[in-house]
């Protein structure tokens, strides 16, 4: 079966999360990805614990499968020349160096397109290459200045980050999309182009309805904890043994909810008849619901409400979430066996499912410089 990205050669000069996640996605669907590192290696190789069963950083392992790896010292002219030969033969280059750093080595877009005009060159930065060029592009920083922390956390508490580097993940997805768009356009023009992705704009676009409400009203939304700014009840509720979520999206679901809770009269209470009124009286409604939900367990409430057509679920740990996905037949984990080295890696599967062109898991995350001799012909590095 032909993979969608089969025959596409990707040079990955990126490190940490956004760039490597983007190139891994391309590799999952057939691209030939070459990870280029300094001798110190991708920083995430040293971000441990936790580690895999063979001692590899789980952070590194999460976003570097389906790649081959070499090391190159950009300051060594021979090694740089060899890398440039590889880039001249590539379809895609992904990098996340600070804007301007690669120019001194002739690895910036304007330089490399002279010898490879068909190259799709993806640059990922924190804040773009203009006024924010010198700003450090750390996910936590962007969550803060990009507005996400201001709407995350309890109303009376302090702003909070999301529990994963979400901005990097959004940037990775945008980078992947931009690369695919540029490759599609290249089929028509024969020319590559530069794909500019910043964490800041990825964050702002990721705010979606929260950003659009700010633009429309001129007012920034407040923190609401786990509540929704436009829907109620749509948040967490205490139970006898933990926390569950109830996510009511319309009047029919609300009627089903209060009927299952044994208080059907709330469906005709003037405070709760319509969603607009439920949002206004969110706190009162939450208190009334929790008086009942604390009387039974989260799992039993979840089963009862879901059978009644009310979206509900207990707040799972990551391990419980993986188990749930498996019971639903979603096959969340894959096992990769490297026949050449005998190494094994269990990974979270790609979330992209195509009916004919399935993701393939060919290579475990590579050791640093593992494929040196396969790619560098004249220089012994």
Image: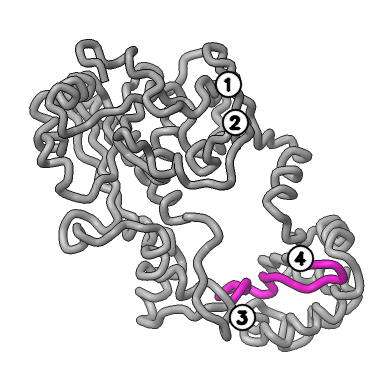
**Could you tell me which secondary element the residue under label 2 belongs to?**
loop
Magenta stretch contains residue 233: yes
Residue drawn at x 19%, y 24% is 79
Query: With respect to residue 87, does 106 lie above or below?
Result: below
Instruction: Return the disc, 1 or 3, that comes first in the chain's sequence.
Output: 3
**Could you tell me which secondary element the residue under label 3 belongs to?**
helix
Magenta stretch: helix, strand or loop mostly: loop
User: For mark 2, what is the residue?
Assistant: 54
The disc at residue 244 is 4
Q: Would residue 173 be seen by someone viewing this image from the given angle?
A: no
User: For mark 1, what is the residue?
Assistant: 343
| Mark 3 and mark 4: Cα distance apart in space | 23 Å
| Mark 1 and mark 4: Cα distance apart in space | 40 Å
**Could you tell me which secondary element the residue under label 4 belongs to?**
strand
Locate residue 267 relative to residue 90 in the image: left or right.
right
Identify which residue, 376 or 237, lies in the foreground.
Answer: 376
Instruction: Return the disc, 3 or 2, that comes first in the chain's sequence.
Output: 2
Contact? badges 1 and 2 (CB < 8 Å):
yes
**Could you tell me which secondary element the residue under label 1 belongs to?**
loop
Q: Position of residue 260 (x, y in %)?
A: 88, 69
User: For mark 3, what is the residue?
Assistant: 276
In front of the other: label 1 or label 4? 1
Q: Position of residue 98 (x, y in %)?
A: 23, 50
């Amino acid at each position: 079966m032909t993979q969608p990205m089969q025959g596409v050669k990707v040079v990955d000069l990126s490190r940490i999360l956004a760039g490597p996640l983007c190139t891994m996605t391309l590799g999952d669907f057939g691209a030939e990805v070459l990870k280029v590192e300094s001798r110190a290696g991708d920083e995430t190789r040293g971000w441990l614990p936790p580690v895999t069963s063979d001692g590899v950083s789980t952070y590194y392992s999460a976003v570097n499968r389906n790649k081959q790896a070499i090391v190159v010292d950009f300051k060594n002219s021979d090694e740089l020349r060899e890398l440039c030969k590889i880039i001249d033969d590539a379809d895609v280059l992904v990098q996340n160096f600070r804007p301007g750093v690669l120019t001194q080595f002739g690895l910036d877009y304007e330089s490399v397109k002279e010898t490879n005009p068909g190259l799709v060159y993806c640059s990922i930065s924190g804040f773009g290459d203009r006024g924010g060029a010198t700003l450090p592009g750390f996910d936590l920083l962007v969550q803060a200045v990009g507005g996400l922390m201001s709407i995350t956390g309890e109303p009376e508490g302090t702003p909070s980050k999301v529990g994963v580097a979400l901005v990097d993940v959004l940037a990775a997805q945008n980078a992947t999309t931009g690369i695919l768009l540029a490759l599609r356009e290249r089929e028509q023009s024969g020319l590559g182009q530069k794909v500019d992705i910043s964490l800041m704009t990825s964050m702002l676009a990721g705010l979606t309805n929260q950003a659009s409400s700010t633009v429309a009203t001129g007012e920034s939304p407040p923190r609401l904890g786990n509540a929704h700014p436009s829907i109620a009840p749509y948040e967490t509720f205490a139970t006898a043994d933990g926390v569950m979520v109830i996510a009511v999206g319309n009047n029919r679901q609300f009627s089903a909810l209060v009927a299952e809770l044994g208080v059907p009269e709330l469906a005709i209470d003037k405070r709760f008849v319509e969603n607009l009124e439920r949002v206004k009286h969110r706190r009162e409604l939450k208190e009334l619901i929790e008086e009942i939900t604390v009387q039974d367990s989260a799992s039993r409430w979840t089963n009862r409400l879901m059978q009644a057509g009310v979206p509900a679920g207990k707040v799972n740990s990551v391990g419980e979430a993986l188990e749930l996905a498996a019971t639903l037949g979603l096959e969340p984990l894959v096992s990769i066996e490297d026949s050449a080295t005998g190494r094994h890696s269990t990974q979270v599967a790609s979330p992209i499912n195509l009916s004919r062109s399935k993701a393939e898991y060919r290579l475990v995350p590579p050791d640093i410089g593992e494929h040196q001799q396969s790619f560098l012909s004249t220089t012994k590095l």
